[in-house]
Amino acid sequence: MDKKFVMSIAAMAALTLVSCSSDDLDSFSDNSSKNEAISFDGYLGRSAVAVNGTRGSVETVTTLKANGFGVFSKYTPTEEGQASFPDFANQQVTYKYSKWTYSPIKYWPTTNGHIDFYAYAPYDKNTTLNNTSFEFNVDPDVAKQKDLLWAKAKVQINTPITSTNNKVNFQFAHALSRLGYTIKLHEQYPSATFKLKKITLAGSPDGTTNAFYKKGTIDLSTVKDPTSGATTGLWNTSSSDKQNFDWFSGTYENLSTTASNPDKDNNYLFVIPQEFKEKTTENPDVDELYVIVNYTITYSDNKTQTNTVYKQIKKNFERGKAYMLNLTIGLPIEFDVNLTEGVGVEGWGEDEGINIGSDGNLWDGIE
């Protein structure tokens, strides 16, 4: 009996990061699948890969293949009372033998309707879905943070179905904002030794107020607006529980006028999208963010000075975008004297005469 299967995909498009220039896509396909089993195809934009190197938490083609992704689904028949379908519930999909695979295999239902597929990466066995959302926690340890990806695909089913074009295609997008930093000395720094001690991101100059969301709820059913590109409703951050990050803590001695990073793997922060502003009398209930840098200066006479500087960051950190904080320290104390006559050094003006021995101001002692 002939079977016909029609699929329509509404996959999420990966957003190009601000530091990247390539929009090429890497695809992992199961081209050998020619049956009625449900199979998956995953895409990750090459623009999502860190340009200046990667670290463990950055989701790349390699990590997506290694860790796989999780899938949930919701089958909606056209008419009530039609055959049921056992939906996917955090099904892990991994890349083996040059194709995406999972177990146990499920098959397409043979009744009209549609299936909404929701995917995320990296896979976590403890992820549970509440309708189409799950709670995501931002790890306080920067080295353990995750670069969260998500995607949605909707498949329309008309019966009878066929075995052609039976893959569910996911194109993953970044759900978080990525922050990186570089640090260097001012070009005019003297022959002193600078040592970086600490970099902190906090909600106040003294670090006593927290800045970043600790957790949020992500809705995997969110799609990107085709006109504006917005992803309204992706995150719910109703919780006021927040945290600061010690981005670097230790001793970094390789400071120079060339920008560098103490972490050879580029120590990125992955944070829930959030807007930071300056509090005003008219608008006191805004989130504030400060970068605080602590460093020491050792002079040629071995005397040491400790400096702590800070600067407020007013920025709307958007999902899927990368931001680089370029820090410069060590602006030396300089002196300047205006050498224009009478400006840099006060002029004496006209001499005021004091006449002695004349004009009635005669010498004393003469009789």
Image (cartoon, rainbow, N blue to C red):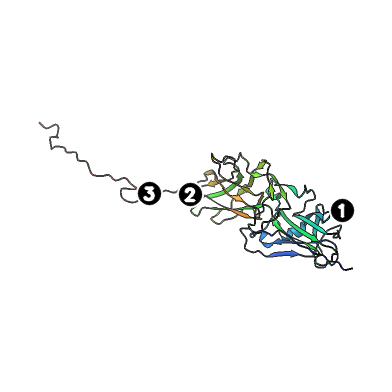
At 80% across and 50% down in the image, what residue appears?
125
Percent x, y of residue 335? 42, 48
User: Vertically, is 341 above or below 24?
Assistant: above
User: Hey, what amino acid is under mark 3?
Assistant: Val
The reply to whether discs 2 and 1 touch (Cβ–Cβ < 8 Å) is no
Disc nearer the start of the sequence (2/3): 2
Residue linked to disc 1: 81
Q: Looking at this view, is 111 or 122 the one in front?
A: 111
Percent x, y of residue 30? 80, 65
Label ID, residue 337: 3
Percent x, y of residue 198? 60, 46
Label ID, residue 219: none
Query: For mark 3, does the 10 Å Cα neighbourhood hold few (<14), some (14 to 19), or many (20 or more) residues?
Result: few
Disc 2 element: loop
Percent x, y of residue 19? 61, 59
- Front: mark 2 or 1: 1
Q: Looking at this view, is 68 or 335 the one in front?
A: 68
At 70% across and 57% down in the image, what residue appears?
173
Q: Horizontally, is 24 left or right of 303 in the view?
A: right
Task: For marks 2 and 3, give the CA distance.
Answer: 16 Å
Q: Looking at this view, is 125 or 351 the one in front?
A: 125
Task: For marks 2 and 1, give the CA distance.
Answer: 78 Å
User: Hey, what amino acid is under mark 2?
Assistant: Pro
User: Hey, what amino acid is under mark 1?
Assistant: Gly
Which of the image's four quarters has the C terminus? Answer: top left
